[in-house]
Image (cartoon, coloured by chain):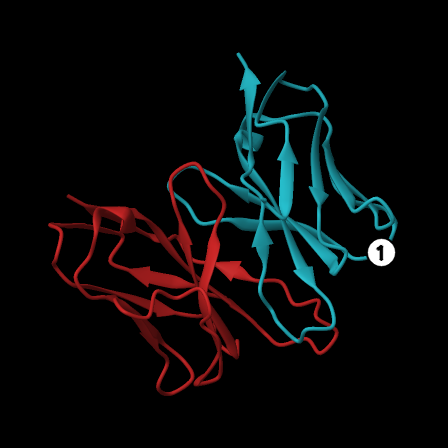
Amino acid sequence: QQKVQQSPESLSVPEGGMASLNCTSSDRNFQYFWWYRQHSGEGPKALMSIFSDGDKKEGRFTAHLNKASLHVSLHIRDSQPSDSALYFCAARSTGTGSNRLTFGKGTKFSLIP
Amino acid sequence: EAGVTQSPRYAVLQEGQAVSFWCDPISGHDTLYWYQQPRDQGPQLLVYFRDEAVIDNSQLPSDRFSAVRPKGTNSTLKIQSAKQGDTATYLCASSFRDWGGEDTQYFGPGTRLLVL
């Protein structure tokens, strides 16, 4: 079973619209989370990290973490053409001393022309 | 500041051939990672180093894959006798150790491998 599950698989919104991407972990050891964005032909780039319950806002992006339910979300407001990409949720365990990141399968986000 | 660089960007092989990938991490980053990203999937860790030491290679197919980082800077990932199932993008990432576990990994552009 995938330890980090993302939904939806794909998402389309009009330019200027708002989008919500979801990520759920099945491993309670996962306590640190990142959102990465990957444009076609490039490597993933870290958008933001979130380690504490609640919201974290960076520009047009807001992440929300609920450790009790192991749920992380990413909200994008005022969507721009440059936001069209694959978005990955990545998680790291605590207590093992390992830097291993476990990625979800990704959400393909695109703008409706 | 220069990012993570990788070469080559593309490689096409016949089954059974060998290939090497090279990675130059961000200057000052002590931790280096190699990931495999199959098409339409997220990256999956193969191996990672802290300085020159291998920390985790549990997901590295040791019979055909090998990775080294001899001076704790650049790294090479090698596939001996490639198989069609190795077709994927190979990503290198680096980070600077944070004892709180909050270090962010920075990825290079990747090498896209096609095994025919």
Location of residue A23 (image quadrant):
top right
The residue lying toward the viewer, choosing from B77 and B96, is B77
* Disc 1 residue type (three-letter): Ser
Residue at mark 1: chain? A
Give x and y (percent) for residue A45. 54, 50
Name the spot of residue A35 as percent of width and height, x first: 65, 47
Image position of B70 (left or right of A110): left
Residue at the image position 58 percent from the left and 55 percent from the top: A102
Kindly indicate which chain is depicted in cyan in the rendered structure.
A
Q: Please indicate, yes or no, whether residue A86 appears anywhere in the rendered image.
A: yes
Residue A47 versus residue A17 in the image, above or below: below
Q: Residue furthest front?
A: A1
Residue A9: name its quadrant. Answer: top right
What color was chain B assigned in the picture? red
Neighbour class for label 1 at 10 Å: few (<14), some, many (≥20)? some
Q: Can residue B3 be seen in this view?
A: no
In the image, taking residue A82 as reference, residue B88 lies left or right, namely left
Q: Name the residue under label 1.
A: A52
